[in-house]
Amino acid sequence: MQRHTFGTLSRRAVVAGTVVLGVGCLGNGDSGSQPADGGSADGDGTAGATEGSTDGNVSQEGTGAGALTLASPAFEHGERIPERYGYEAENVNPPLEVEGVPAGAASLALIVDDPDAVEPAGEVWDHWVVWNVPPDTESIPEDWTPTEADQGTNDFGEVGYDGPNPPDREHRYRFRLFALDATLDLPTGTDANDLADAMDGHVLARAKLVGTFPP
């Protein structure tokens, strides 16, 4: 498999980010003004937003006991993603663990992207777009083929997961989980921007897990 060049498959206008995160509010672009995750611009577009507390391989965005959390047994938050999950290796999604889904949630959504792709590709690069995950989901297995959830189109032009493949240096990869108060009626061709639009006003809670690649 040849190494992918970001720019050849770019389908969106040049932007500084993909999704504005907020409880009950979601927009279409990171502000790029808030340093996080190692000092680079990786804000979630909401003034004063922070990543929340971290404990080992768990990233928690939210406050209080029972806040939504996202973790992986394959890598710790802020650490390196194993090579097997890369685009040029086995290209399967890493396993994920979910806790603290709010009682009122009707579904979960997941966006995996690369904010460090802005420099080489001109945009945040989306690797996985998933919605209508059942709210009682506690784990997503490695190499998951959803049967009760829907997957959209990533920036490789494919439906489903495509793994990290930075063209220039080590990049950060964000696994962002959203608890929603509704299920979403969206077509298979939905991309991250479309999903962000559909989630606007429906986000009850959010969590973020960050890993780096290459290993």
Image: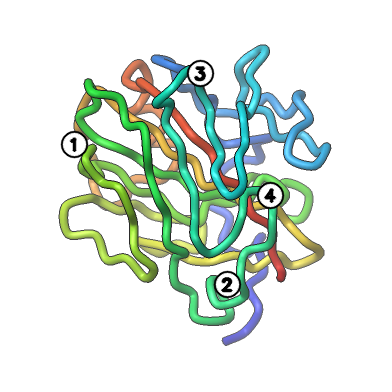
Q: Earlier in the sequence, mark 2 or mark 1?
A: 2
Q: Which residue shows up at 52% across the image and 47% down it?
A: 175
What is the distance, in whole Å, between disc 3 and disc 1 at their CAs? 30 Å
**Which tag, 3 or 1, sits closer to the chain's start?**
3
SS state under label 2: loop
Q: Please report whichever mark, 1 or 4, sits nearer to the chain's N-terminal start.
A: 4
**What number is the disc on residue 63?**
3
Q: Nearer the viewer, mark 3 or mark 1?
A: 3
Asked if labels 1 and 3 touch by Cβ distance under 8 angstroms, the answer is: no
**Looking at numbered disc 4 in the image, what kind of residue is underneath it?**
Gly
In screen coordinates, is 83 left or right of 38? left
Q: Which residue occupies 69% across, 64% down?
A: 213
Label 4, secondary structure: give it.
loop
Nearer to me, 119 or 47 = 47
Residue pushed farthest bottom?
A: 1
In this view, 33 is above or below 115:
above
Residue 185 tag number: 1
Mark 2 burial class by Cα count in 10 Å: few <14, some 14-19, many 20+: many
Residue at which label 2 appears: 86
Near mark 3 (Cα within 10 A), the count class, few <14, some 14-19 or many ≥20, is few
Quadrant placement of the N terminus: bottom right
Q: Which element is circle 3 on?
A: loop
Nearest to viewer (mark 1 / mark 4): 4
Distance of label 3 from label 2 (alpha carbons): 33 Å
Distance Cα–Cα, label 1 vs label 4: 33 Å
**Viewport quadrant of the C terminus:** bottom right
Q: In this image, 40 relative to 183: left or right?
A: right
Near-viewer residue (25 or 176): 176
Q: Position of residue 77 (x, y in %)?
A: 62, 49
Tell me what residue is drawn at x 76 percent, y 24 percent.
33
For residue 78, which numbered disc appears in the image? 4
